[in-house]
Image (cartoon, grey):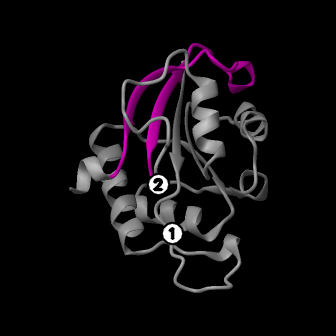
Amino acid sequence: MTRLILMRHAKSSWAEPGKKDHARPLNKRGNRAAAAIGHWMQEENYVPDQILSSSAKRTRETFEGLGIEGKPAYLDKLYEADPQDMLEVLRGATGATVLMIGHNPTIADFAHDLVVQAPDHPKFGGYPTCATLVVDFPVADWGEVQPGTGTPVDFIVPRELTD
């Protein structure tokens, strides 16, 4: 059994007009959301042993804000990825529990592609910032993962933890 924790980056700042998209940091709400999701992950024992993240500043800051152990691989390929790119990266994973952090609309599309059935959650379709899906796959090796075979274990958005 393999487990994926699929997370969209936390809320980013648009306060600096003209700043390149790749360099946008988190805003205050994003920092609070990342901390809340990190605390939730620890409480639920959703602890990754491998972290694969987009190389963008906001995904880096999201991981840092989670406050969990691990040495992330920051991959340019996950920055402007499509769902097929994400699947390719995931198939090369080696951990038993993998955290992937990326961007919409790809994260939402990828999440929908992966699961047998969408979680019964009103926000799953839009996958808001820092939304997190925990999904199990009936395979021993990530190279065997196929779309439409994942079983959702949990799905949460930060507002459920902060409001």
Q: Give the Cα distance between marks 2 and 1.
A: 9 Å
Residue 72 percent across, percent down from the top left: 61, 56
Q: Nearer the viewer, residue 150 or 52?
A: 150
Dot 2 and dot 1 residues touching (CB under 8 Å): yes
The circle on residue 156 is: none
Residue 30 percent across, percent down from the top left: 41, 66
Judged from the image, the secondary structure of the residue bearing numbered disc 2 is: loop
Q: Which residue is mark 2?
A: 129
When asked about the image quadrant of residue 27, the answer is bottom left
Which residue corresponds to the image point at 75% horizontal and 55% vertical from the top-left?
Answer: 80
* Residue 87 located left or right of residue 3: right
* Residue 129 located left or right of residue 16: left
- The three-letter code of the residue at mark 1 reads Ser
Q: Is residue 102 visible?
A: yes
> Taking 119 as reference, is 131 above or below it?
below
Which residue corresponds to the image point at 58% horizontal and 86% vertical from the top-left?
Answer: 16
Q: Which residues are magenta?
A: 129-158
Residue 10 belongs to the span the image colors magenta? no
Judged from the image, the secondary structure of the residue bearing numbered disc 1 is: loop
Q: Which residue is mark 1?
A: 12
Q: Nearer the viewer, residue 69 or 26?
A: 26
At label 1, counting other C-alpha atoms closer than 10 Å, the crowd grade (few under 14, some 14-19, many 20 or more) is many
Total numbered labels:
2
Q: Nearer the viewer, residue 80 or 40?
A: 80
Q: Is residue 95 visible?
A: no
- Residue furthest left as drawn: 163
Residue 131 belongs to the span the image colors magenta? yes
* Residue 92 located left or right of residue 25: right
Residue 143 percent across, percent down from the top left: 75, 24
- The three-letter code of the residue at mark 2 reads Thr
Which residue corresponds to the image point at 42% horizontal and 65% vertical from the top-left?
Answer: 65
Residue 101 percent across, percent down from the top left: 58, 50
